[in-house]
Image (cartoon, rainbow, N blue to C red):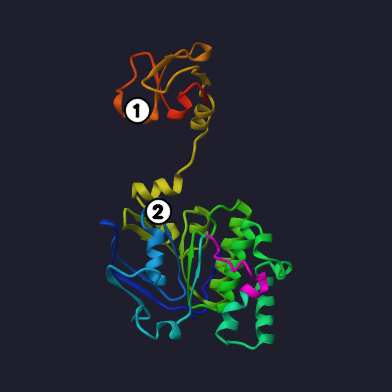
Amino acid sequence: MNIGCPQQQGVSLSVRGLRKSYSGNEVLKGIDLDVAAAEILVIVGPSGSGKSVFLRQIIGLEELDTGNILIEGQPIESPDITTRYRVAMVFQSGALLTSMTVGESVGFYLAQHGLKTPDEIAETVARDLEQAGLKSAEDKMPDELSGGTRKRMAIARALAMEPQLILYDEPTGGLDPVSSVNVAEDIARLNRRIGATSVVVSNDRELAFGVAHRVVMLDEGCIVAIGTPEEMKASPDARVQQFINANISRTQASSIHALPNVSIPGHDGKGPLEAAAPGGAEPLLIVPDSEERHFGEAPAGHLRLAIPAAAAKGRKCS
């Protein structure tokens, strides 16, 4: 997906020495990052690496422990930051207003802040919903929408604000491939139209390498790699390559589906159990997972199989 070069109406974002801990557990460990005006930056990384926590610090949902976050060189805690710059966030859940129709929700910010007349708001809502392919949904309630439509509606709502900085938390999470592509195209369209600086947290590889100007990888609270999609693809870092190439091979999938069904009638789930596998395969040493740490390697000529402890109590596991 070629996103082109938007007219720069976005704002620059700088992060210096950002640290965040919860109950003594340090989640962000000194993040330094610069995001250029009108750039789309996608942040990837394993679960628990600090991606969503990082977004919450930028939007001001949590108080910083240490470090600085600057928009156009101005600290985000400055009193006039919200009046000088428009910042929007698309939450993973969509955070939709359930008591309003789609059209009312999209135009809510404009009406609340008196930024446009009712006629102008109606025109903006109609335009943005049409661009998002949601014109027919204008009078629907959020609970009538599919997951993909909810995400696109949340983006249309941000589009109506014409933000200078927009933050996305897993915008394609839980969506089917077609809906994911539609959402990625919406992100690129918003960038092209108003040049909004975009920071996107996502582990969607198609989105990351399809719309990003640069990709950042977080791991254990630190930036471990950063570069253009082409630079990241060429990175020798094993963590980057694992993210890019992670897949279940046909051999692995065959092995998973070939696991035999083992019936354990009357077993109480305590201790290992030896059972014969069907088809003349090696015998199995079956170990409930709650006690697996107490047992060593399987004896010679056996395969080791850990199963949920509950399944060991007379149930059939596969």
What residue do we see at 31% from left, 53% from top? 220
Q: Are marks 1 and 2 in contact (CB under 8 Å)?
A: no
97 in the magenta segment:
yes
Which of 102/304 is in front? 102
Q: Label 1 is placed on what type of residue?
A: Glu
212 in the magenta segment:
no
What is the secondary structure assignment of the residue under circle 2? loop
Location of residue 253 in the rendering, given as x and y in whole percent from the top left corner: 52, 32
Q: Label 2 is placed on what type of residue?
A: Gly
What residue do we see at 54% from left, 28% from top? 257
- Residue 255 vertical position relative to residue 220 in the rendered view, above or below: above
- Please name which of the two marks, 1 or 2, marks the residue nearer to the observer: 1
Alpha-carbon neighbours of circle 1 within 10 Å: few (<14), some, or many (≥20)? some
Q: Looking at the image, is mark 1 or mark 2 earlier in the sequence? A: 2
Location of residue 297 in the rendering, given as x and y in whole percent from the top left corner: 31, 22
Location of residue 139 in the rendering, given as x and y in whole percent from the top left corner: 72, 70
Chief secondary structure of the magenta span? loop
Q: Which residue is mark 2?
A: 45
Alpha-carbon neighbours of circle 2 within 10 Å: few (<14), some, or many (≥20)? many
Which stretch appears magenta? Answer: 93-105
On the picture, is 122 further left or further right than 242? right
**Disc 1/disc 2 C-alpha distance (Å):** 29 Å
Q: Which residue is mark 1?
A: 292
- Residue 173 vertical position relative to residue 142 in the rendered view, above or below: above
Location of residue 238 in the rendering, given as x and y in whole percent from the top left corner: 35, 46
In the rendered picture of this protein, how many numbered marks are placed on residues?
Answer: 2
Residue at the right extreme of this rendering: 136
